[in-house]
Amino acid sequence: MRKWIAAAALLAPLIVQAQSWPQKPIKVIVPFPPGGVTDAIARITADWLTPRLGQPVVPENRPGASGALAAELVARSEPDGYTLFSAATPQLAVVPYVQKINYDPLKDFAPVSIVGTNAFALGCNDRTPVKTLTELVEYARARPGQLNFASPGAGSVGHLTMSLLLARAGLKMEAVLYKGGGPAMVDVIAGHVNCYFGNYNELIPHAGSGKVRLLATSGAKRARQLPDVPTVAEQGFAGFRTETWNGYVAPAGTPREVVERIAREIAAGCKDDAFVSRLDKIGVDAVCSTPARFAEAIRDDLALWKEAVAAAGVKAQ
């Protein structure tokens, strides 16, 4: 009885706090500089939440170490609902395998909601004589070690997606590393590099001009933006799927009522045309998941990207 009373006494302040939350501005830590997709999603979501929570939701950019610095800051923050993390797949499911980190992606965070997801498109330049993924596999198999692919950095999701595909196809292609997707696309278009797995908005403009042929997309289903491009899974690689998600997480121990309140408000966004349209304009499909579904996605993707990192041969720094 005494133990029960003691436990209740410890929980009481948290329950009262959750019931009165929020009473001051809420910080959203963004792991990259302003201007990218993760930053845009953080700001779109913060704009949506501010009037619904009755307090300013303020994004704060804390770039560094591929997002690990921001993740660690949030993991060590007070679990009071006033510090959130606009996390992307790399910080919670890729970075743990490619560099030393001071946080546990499963134990140190309380998942709130996946806001949106985006898969990738595989494109090859017009000098590479293939029009489908099947043709690329056959062409590469007949020319072992002669083809290459662009990567926007070692351990990037584009690099890992291509490496995973090559491993499952039993092929080898040389990775040509660049500092970002922009320089990578320049060399693909110029014909210096055969192929590139990148974001839709990087490849679609050049596909329209005929400089790049789109062979496949990496999602579980066809991309709404590219309905005529079959998925990798449709072309002989059943179960193949890579995509990135962006969502909000809180420090572990944040009151459940607070987590569920934020998740409900975000979920309402997916029923709002203006919110969905803002995400669509940056190539992101609105999801607005439950906390439980987000937790499941993190666990699943830790296994997926572990396989991809091994296939790419990326070693932890």
Image: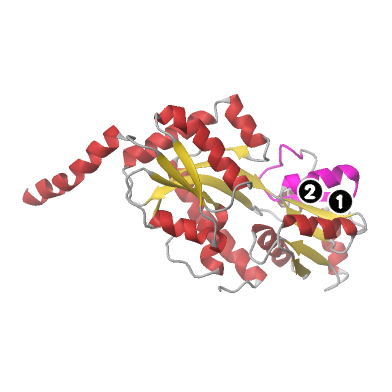
Q: Judging from the image, what secondary structure is the residue with disc 2 in?
A: helix
> Whole-percent x and y of residue 109?
40, 53
Q: Is residue 194 above or below residue 118?
A: below
Q: Is residue 115 left or right of residue 173?
A: left
State which region is magenta.
200-226
**Residue indicated by mark 1:** 212
Does any portion of residue 134 appear in the rendered image?
no
Q: Residue, x 40% and y 48% (percent of image)?
A: 250
Which of the numbered marks, if any, corresponds to residue 203? 2
Disc 2 + disc 1, Cβ < 8 Å: yes
The residue sitting at the left extreme is 2
Q: Residue, x 10% and y 51% (percent of image)?
A: 3
Q: Residues within 10 Å of mark 1 (few under 14, many from 20)?
A: many
> Whole-percent x and y of residue 43?
55, 39
Seen from the viewer's position, the closer of residues 118 and 278 is 278
Q: Is residue 115 magenta?
A: no
Q: Is residue 135 left or right of residue 305?
A: right
